[in-house]
Image (cartoon, coloured by chain):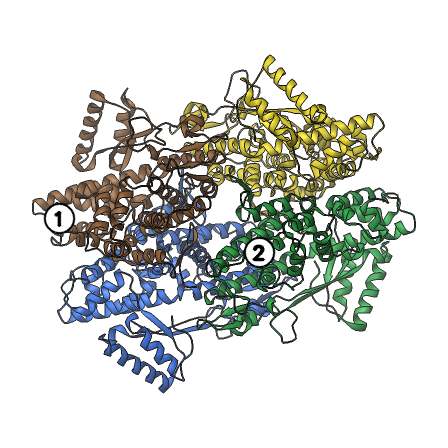
Chain colours: A green, B yellow, C blue, D brown
Amino acid sequence: MGKRIYRDPVHNIISLDQDSEPDRLLIALIDAPEFQRLRRIKQLGLALYTYQGAEHSRFVHSLGVMHLMNRVLTLLGEHHPIDEGVRLVALCAALLHDVGHGPFSHVVETLLGFHHEEWTVRLISDPRTQIHQLLSHTDRELPEKIIAVLEHRYRPRFVAQLVSSQLDVDRFDYLLRDSLMTGAKYGFFDLEWVLHALELDPREDRLYVSAKGLYAVEEYLQARYYMFRQVYFHRALRTAEVLLKAIFRRAIELNAAGQLRFNLSDSPMGKLLQQKTLTTEEYVELDDHDLMFFIKQWAHERDPILRDLAHRFLERRILKSIDFTLTGALKDEFIDRARRIVARAGFDPDYYLSEDRASDTPYRPYTPEQAHPESCIYIAENGGQLQEITRVSAVVAGMRPFHLNRLCFPEEVFEEISTLAEEAPFVEGSPS
Amino acid sequence: MGKRIYRDPVHNIISLDQDSEPDRLLIALIDAPEFQRLRRIKQLGLALYTYQGAEHSRFVHSLGVMHLMNRVLTLLGEHHPIDEGVRLVALCAALLHDVGHGPFSHVVETLLGFHHEEWTVRLISDPRTQIHQLLSHTDRELPEKIIAVLEHRYRPRFVAQLVSSQLDVDRFDYLLRDSLMTGAKYGFFDLEWVLHALELDPREDRLYVSAKGLYAVEEYLQARYYMFRQVYFHRALRTAEVLLKAIFRRAIELNAAGQLRFNLSDSPMGKLLQQKTLTTEEYVELDDHDLMFFIKQWAHERDPILRDLAHRFLERRILKSIDFTLTGALKDEFIDRARRIVARAGFDPDYYLSEDRASDTPYRPYTPEQAHPESCIYIAENGGQLQEITRVSAVVAGMRPFHLNRLCFPEEVFEEISTLAEEAPFVEGSPS
Amino acid sequence: MGKRIYRDPVHNIISLDQDSEPDRLLIALIDAPEFQRLRRIKQLGLALYTYQGAEHSRFVHSLGVMHLMNRVLTLLGEHHPIDEGVRLVALCAALLHDVGHGPFSHVVETLLGFHHEEWTVRLISDPRTQIHQLLSHTDRELPEKIIAVLEHRYRPRFVAQLVSSQLDVDRFDYLLRDSLMTGAKYGFFDLEWVLHALELDPREDRLYVSAKGLYAVEEYLQARYYMFRQVYFHRALRTAEVLLKAIFRRAIELNAAGQLRFNLSDSPMGKLLQQKTLTTEEYVELDDHDLMFFIKQWAHERDPILRDLAHRFLERRILKSIDFTLTGALKDEFIDRARRIVARAGFDPDYYLSEDRASDTPYRPYTPEQAHPESCIYIAENGGQLQEITRVSAVVAGMRPFHLNRLCFPEEVFEEISTLAEEAPFVEGSPS
Amino acid sequence: MGKRIYRDPVHNIISLDQDSEPDRLLIALIDAPEFQRLRRIKQLGLALYTYQGAEHSRFVHSLGVMHLMNRVLTLLGEHHPIDEGVRLVALCAALLHDVGHGPFSHVVETLLGFHHEEWTVRLISDPRTQIHQLLSHTDRELPEKIIAVLEHRYRPRFVAQLVSSQLDVDRFDYLLRDSLMTGAKYGFFDLEWVLHALELDPREDRLYVSAKGLYAVEEYLQARYYMFRQVYFHRALRTAEVLLKAIFRRAIELNAAGQLRFNLSDSPMGKLLQQKTLTTEEYVELDDHDLMFFIKQWAHERDPILRDLAHRFLERRILKSIDFTLTGALKDEFIDRARRIVARAGFDPDYYLSEDRASDTPYRPYTPEQAHPESCIYIAENGGQLQEITRVSAVVAGMRPFHLNRLCFPEEVFEEISTLAEEAPFVEGSPS
């Protein structure tokens, strides 16, 4: 076999052909240091505190996305010839779509001042990265084309649809992979059927789903819905993230005040703590190991707050939380009273009490003012006419956004805050 | 549910009952910092350089082993009442059997002077660990009983057989888990059938396998055989380990010579580099993040050898290798010539050329002088009489040990050393 | 192993212990001729014309239902002791719930004048069946108790809930098994999680689902919904059934007119064709082979209609169909015109044109006038209070019944009837 | 989708494209009555008496074989262009390789005087079959080409290798399918890896396996070995077959003597009982339903032997058996004594006592006198040179043929014959 073969728990065999020019580029991109670094960045961050098996990296996910892109293009290509150049752009974009992710991105990037989407663009466009050099050596325009896909400017439009829409190969891979690894199973859907139902309308430059695929797409959207409710928004995962944020807020403040013993100030992490901008080279060095190593050192700091928070994090003594639905003055009062409880128990409420809010929309239907109508899902009716999915599926039309609104605090005050919540006329939901 | 439930990719649901006293102890042990630390230690070390999905930790494996012990005891208990005290010892031993593992144990423990078996005993016996306190609070003798199991001194003897023999729950879990995670599949066997075929002979205090289980046990031994050949002894995995050893040898020498910039000399890693003994507390702090973080720092050292080795490691530019079967003077000559090739290419052969040797015996039959006859596998013939498995299975009797003997070196000299190997009358096997 | 072990594609190992008295009864029931006969009756009848893998028998399903009952009782028994006598009744009822099924029951039982529910009761209560003798030999009341379960009269009530409600082990098994065998996958749900979430409220004598199980139960209801839409109500399956009904209608008429050459008038099938009542013994002889053998003979009849219908059936040249939603006079007109098209093409519309109607309600919420409130699903809120599921799940509350209304006819007139449907102002939906 | 899609429990989606000419032929062949008839012939005959899930038909297996042929050709075609005409021959041969199978072929074909291989050739070559007409309409030579493949005369030779050798798509499908359906699991092997390791040497016109595929092929051969031991040669399956043979021997004799009430003498089954030759049309009518229906009727015959045998068969009261290794005079004496035991117990030993012999060779290495050297397995060493597999694999070289030699008799004499076997100096093995 002149083949590079990856065995994958989800897709089984991911095969690249060293005798084919496009595959040789993909192999070289995978071997580039900027991509190898994704081995050291977990796909689901702190989810392993809830689902201990969720230890997989962005590296394996990215391979899976590239593989699915390849499969989709092969299937579509049976009926519509796909330009080789377009195919290469699509495969590279699939492989590299997450390359700018940093450690625990969803949690700490705002705190530490980096945005993974910007870094993805930068790693592709910066002439000093190996990724950029490999791409531009193949085709000087290639880096820009890939960025155009990521920014929904590339034509044909269906490439961006496949990389990033409400029915894309990124979601296909992460739902299946996260389901398998967490063991939570909610994200399984009938991938093969969906793949075989995907069709390309070359005149309108639009992907759609044939009539027979409707139920499988419904199932896919429901799979995503349940994964959000049961995994991505899981209470323990979210409160672990709240704890991680508190650690970094405290560390940044101590550092600014010159009170942090361990900061390695000229390392990438050290510079982030000082809110300095990183060079591309420095950013590429950054991964989960840095964050974890720093937190482990902080468990020995003199500052009792940082030390305690770090210990809680390392020993998985994460926060507790309670759902609430209050707004306005009632909410202010509730939080105010909760802060006083936390403070009375000896905890600084600035670090030990946090509101946690998030929401997800299972499916966003088409609206005329939409920037990217191609991110909607279109179904061919049996007659052949395309319809946005909410027109033909009562199930999808009936899917509602969900919101979480929680207050997080140490286990030590769980009883008191539960009682506060029950006493109040204003709190519903159940603590846990 | 008053239950602590873990979802597991291999076993699906691992359930502990907070209303049951033994389970409450197991939950507390899992929550202890010494056990939580296993989340940060990969089960298969560098295997992810070959099988990128092999990212699972010793934490998930240890949960799986405990779960399987629970299942076996329940099945055995259908026919033979199992003493509650014995059951608790067995479950704790299964859970804690790997608790002393350090980062990349199989590779670096000899270099850095720790042995995971000793540390397992120490973490259980040291009165300052939370694990010890939890155990001895339940039963003052419990720590010693668990250590007795691990050291094959405990009675009834079948407990140690289940924890550590040639047919034990540790192997059951790791074969299935490593197969799933690597995607290599070689380790799958018919677990359920084996579990249902396990029987206890209480008079002889011995586990055996009923006649119907023979084929499934053959399959299990073959599964293990193939996992060794295809995963645990995989060429890329082994040469990555050789590279890691070279890094640490160089770092220790530079450190001794005062030429290592980054060593954090009072951290656990820093002390290991100085070959100092760690306290229990320090050992518990040590995990994969430390090693990876140090190696990342060393990629900036002034020493060109350490810097280069670290870069190769981080970017997965691992060594190449060639099998050989020479011995005696012929081998010396071969290695000597290879060293000169390596040196001529500008690499210091002390770090860039290594022999790699290993062997595995798929099954060790009973011999009279054996220390632990209970580690053999016994099969009940249809008449009911027990036989050591090689007496009844031509397949097992025919399994042969296998050895690997390789020379590892940088890709840059691959052509030259391949030619050397082909020229010699004395080299067989194929480079790759 | 003193065990009777069945390997099962869905549940893996189904084990019965020959040393346990209840299991010995179950083994004897399985070995009884009335139960062995279920090997010769397909679970899904004609579904294999759509999903060619759906060849499994009611025998394997019945074993699976018994196995799941055993698992549920073991799990419930961890918290609430379950009376051994009740346990035995539950297991027997699970095993025997389908024992009265005849060949292609859902299709031909009305035509041929048998009802499988009545026959189930009769096979259990008739003193001449081996099943009855085995049961009454164990406990003279046992046959009556099992019938009481099937008729929702037995107490404790939870037994009937487990055997036959909207969350029962029958549905658990058939959804998973039919999904696997058809390859359609729609029926997969998280069985293990549901099983671990089932709880018993012994005071109210009611099963319920703990709060953590809500999403899994939602998924289970959706799985059933999709299986109905995609498998049980599949167009090709339903039209094959319509064809089978036409064959039997024609055969009965020819037989009454003395024009059927092959009828073996004193065989059970022969008696059914004469609309005579069968004895228990005769009924037990009846299975899929009889129907298929008769149809194969009828392919040689002189009557051109029966001959043609039989050939179409055997060669899987099934009917075509079209959905319609007309009612009243418009519908009458549509069907009338369609009959004329069929007749003009040379087919007797009495046999070649049929309306096919069916509907399913994904979940029936509790209503005060309900006969069996225990067939609803109850969820424990986090506080512990039980709620009927539609009160806490927007997903379940939003599930709507669906109806199918189709006209079936030979492929030869497909174009014409499609055109008729399109022309009409009154037809919607798409032919296929 | 202009696609004909089959969902398959083993291969998931089997897709044929109605817009492609070769696929249209395959679809038409599948729809032909001679192929549809395979729906009514079980793949594993009586295996369902041992593994109750083994209810799948030769229809689903044949689809699977065609699908695998398609996959192999696509993979091979990535490196070597495969002629479209050759591809069509290969697909048709894969689809039709079993089309001549009759009901329970392996058991009754010698008794009833048909050989499925001959019938396969006849159904393809007889101008009156729809299969023949479809093939010859596409290419007048096509029927003959397909027969040439089945008879190992076709060139290029690799087509016959893929259809029928020691590493062929037939075995790939049946091992996986029979494993899944029986639940016995022994037949699982790493199909994907084998498929990706198959290579074509166009100069030598030979298939081989690349070096990386060696272990997977070893596993495949072991899978087949265990399936023979545990499934295809299972004691209960074999004794059920012995019983079936006895039924037919008795029925043929009674029929010849004019003492069989039920024989439908002008039906295909009736003619077989008279040892008459069937026309192609008659043969195509024959399936499992005929045999089962006849046996059910025979349970009402006056002849007590046939009646009893038929009842035992239908109620799965199959024979018992004992292994023995005697030969020569000792064997004669043993069987003679056993016959007397059987006769004393009131059973006619001509029908109630049978020897059952069978053997399988896990792998036949190349020998110079071999008719079809292409049926061996060839492995490419790392250097590229091809070797017959026993030269490079100690595992395969060590695989030994196994033989079964059993005596079958009614359960009623089990004790006595067991005692006889134990008494004798000449009997080994264990009754069960």
- Gap in angstroms between the C-alphas marked 2 and 1: 79 Å
Q: Residue furthest bottom?
A: C329
Hey, what amino acid is under mark 1? Arg
Dot in front, 2 or 1: 2
At x 13%, y 44%, the residue is D252
Secondary structure of the residue carrying numbered label 2 = helix
List x then y, in percent, for residue B112: 74, 28
- Which image quadrant: the C terminus of chain D? top left
Q: Residue furthest left?
A: D258
List x then y, in percent, for residue A176: 57, 53
At x 80%, y 35%, the residue is B301
List x then y, in percent, for residue D396: 41, 29
Query: In the image, D159: left or right of A430?
Result: left
List x then y, in percent, for residue A279: 80, 50
* Position of B225 relative to C135 (above/below): above
Q: Residues within 10 Å of mark 2 (few under 14, many from 20)?
A: few
Query: In the image, C61: left or right of B23?
Result: left
Q: Using the rendered image of the protein, determine whether residue B419 is visible from the camera's viewpoint.
A: yes
Say which chain tag 2 marks: A
* Position of B44 relative to A332 (above/below): above
* Position of C294 relative to C431 (above/below): above
Q: Using the rendered image of the protein, determine whether residue B199 is visible from the camera's viewpoint.
A: no
Determine which quarter of the picture holds residue C347.
Answer: bottom left
Query: In the image, C173: left or right of C339?
Result: right
Hey, what amino acid is under mark 2? Gly
Query: In the image, D112: left or right of B349?
Result: left
- Which image quadrant: the N terminus of chain D? bottom left
Q: Residues within 10 Å of mark 1 (few under 14, many from 20)?
A: few
Q: Nearer the viewer, residue C85 or D346?
A: D346
For mark 2, what is the residue? A85
For mark 1, what is the residue? D302
Determine which quarter of the picture holds residue C1.
Answer: top left
